[in-house]
Image (cartoon, rainbow, N blue to C red):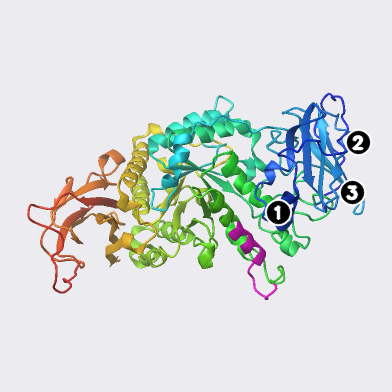
Amino acid sequence: MPVQSKNAPRARAADTATPAAATAPSVPASYLLSDLDVFLLREGSHSRLYDKLGAHPASRDGADGVHFAVWAPNATAVSVIGDFNGWDGGATQLRRRGDGSGIWEGFAADVRPGALYKYRVTNTATGFQADKGDPYAFAWEQPPRTASVVWGLDYMWGDQAWMQRRSRANALNAPMSVYEVHPGSWRRAGSDARFLSYRELAVQLGDYAEEMGFTHVELMPVTEHPFYGSWGYQTTGYFAPTARYGSPQDFMYLVDSLHRRGIGVILDWVPSHFPGDEHGLVYFDGTHLYEHADPRQGFHPDWNSYIFNYGRNEVRAFLLSSALFWLDKYHIDGLRVDAVASMLYLDYGRREGQWIPNEHGGRENLQAIGFLRSLNEAVYRDFPDTQTIAEESTAWPMVSRPTSMGGLGFGMKWNMGWMHDTLSYFALDPIHRRHHHNQLTFSIWYAFHENFVLPLSHDEVVYGKGSLLQKLPGDVWQKFANLRLLFGYMWAHPGKKLLFMGSEFGQWREWNHDQSLDWHLLDGETHRGVQRWVADLNALYGREPVLHGDDFTTGGFEWVVAEDAEQSALAFLRKSGGDEVLVACNFTPVPRYNYALGVPRPGRWVELLNSDAVIYGGSGQGNMGGVESAPLARHGHYHSVSLTLPPLGVVYLKHAAPAPGEGGEPGGGGEPGGGG
């Protein structure tokens, strides 16, 4: 239980105190809760509570002010304290509604946008009194201050063209190359290395993401959080962008600007846990309201934070409303839902005896499962042109399958297995890679069981893990060649792509949230080469439907060579709409000359990309722009090409046009012979 608090935020000069309204406004207003609102809240299905609870500008009897409403069912008294009443707990008392909803509400005249406030919540039964921020506040003071701020969300959006076509941009068969960004450390400004504002990010990040060809930007949590070092994952303001970088309208401007450039915005959203800061949700009304009372269910030992009680309907409605709020008011295009595995399992991060089984004796969190399904149903019901993406690290089945089929209903899921196996393989000295070849090929066995995103995220470049470049073996040249190979293999592998900031130009130092990325590295040609390689991968990925159109179906992939462990080589076809791209990878520093690969069409195969090209920092070995096929059967096809596989390199080739009078595979007959 938090200690009792008599502390208020820094006091301002008191305005004239205005008593709370004793009765509801005489004219019904959109911010007032109806009987239906109360029913949906108590049922746990209300997904627009941000229109009803919190602080909303209002008028009563000709006086302008603010209507306040907060859910605190076990409180014995609630008042609004703020800079408009001298932080006086007796000046603006709220009244409890008489409908059993547990909501306290009231009107305060002469309160204007920008006013600071908190709720002073008293529970005489538990001897509790604390000054709480508004769970539904649209804005907060800049940390470390902790007051909520009365704020409106008016904004003149200019992204109509994007909103009209985003169903195509967010479709499962569309290209999705996501640039993951921490706004506070992507780039700093000035001699004092201050944060960039949302509006500065709109220009600088927008320019960069557009230049690099990323289709989406994923922002690590911008929901208000008291501790900057939590990166936003310890959220207190579930309806407010952090004030560190500007106002709510400034954040809208960032989203709007990215949309005008044709770039989608994904928000990292955290319904799995919340911090124990006294001004936040914990022990909100003198009882364990948002969290479970039993720490075996309500406290997360790994993160020293509290777990939502997904079995309480009003908590479910709070979280549903938060998710839809960002899609509604901020035009967010997708939610990456953090730590889903911790929600699904009651024993997550716990030893025997530290958790409580479900009603059937199992380890599944049935209430959390029900919430996640409700969440996804609500999102796709109201915003069918957006996506929800699960960070889920276990083998839980059907995460990205519809709830009607028994799935959790997410649109996509992070492929953590691919990430772990791939980085483990790439960390090996190439001389040992032939003994671990299955770490590359195994992912295809399950690649189409879910709608996967391939993530190389912030989690892989912190806590002493080193940057991606640092992880890779060999001398400096080999490290950079390995990095280009890693990205080339990743962009060709089935699944959408996600890359954390700094990795795209080969940052040496692991990520530090207190510092800007090392942009000065781009003064070096080798780093610029990696950056150019990622930009060219994005460009090719976006314009070639074969590389993204059938990411989630078995028809989009075909092995050509899967078992050449001795030479640590792989080759496969990406396919869509009757077209193909051949991808061949060499995971050793030894060039492979005259490497024969079967192809489905005769004629010229043009080299689209080669990671060993000099412009990327490579040695310049390749296939002189393309090769002609020969009528020699290989790997299940009647024609083959003979390639140079560059050292620690990947090449992409595409069929140009058949020779006059020639078609594809001849009809009839048995399967042609294979061979290496």
Q: Is residue 591 a member of the stretch shown in magenta?
A: no
Of pointers 3 and 1, the one earlier in the residue sequence: 1
Give the labeled residue for mark 1. 40
Marks 3/2: CA distance? 14 Å
Residue position for label 3:
76
* The disc label shown at residue 90, or none: 2
| Residue 602 seen in render | yes
Q: Could you tell me which residue is drawn at 43 percent across and 34 percent down?
A: 261
Numbered disc 3: secondary structure: loop
The amino acid on which the numbered mark 1 sits, given as a three-letter code, is Leu
Give the residue drawn at x 72%, y 28%: 114
Q: Which quarter of the image is occupied by the C terminus? A: bottom left
x, y percent for residue 420: 46, 59
Q: Nearer the viewer, mark 3 or mark 1?
A: 1
The residue carrying pointer 3 sits among few (fewer than 14), some (14 to 19) or many (20 or more) residues within 10 Å by Cα, namely some
In space, the residues marked 3 and 1 are separated at their CA atoms by 24 Å
**Nearest the eye: 459 or 467:** 459
Residue range (magenta): 359-374
Vertical order, 414 against 96 (above or below)? below
Closer-to-camera residue (576/273): 576
Location of residue 312 in the rendering, given as x and y in whole percent from the top left corner: 73, 59
Q: Secondary structure at mark 2?
A: loop
Q: Residues within 10 Å of mark 2 (few under 14, many from 20)?
A: some
- Snapshot quadrant of residue 212: top left
Rounded to the nearest angstrom, the CA distance separating label 1 from label 2 is 32 Å
Q: Is residue 395 visible?
A: no
Is 619 positioned to the left or the right of 55 in the image? left
Amino acid type, mark 3: Thr
**Depicted 271 relative to depicted 395: above or below:** above
Say whether disc 1 or disc 2 marks the residue closer to the N-terminus: 1
55 and 671: which is toward the camera: 55
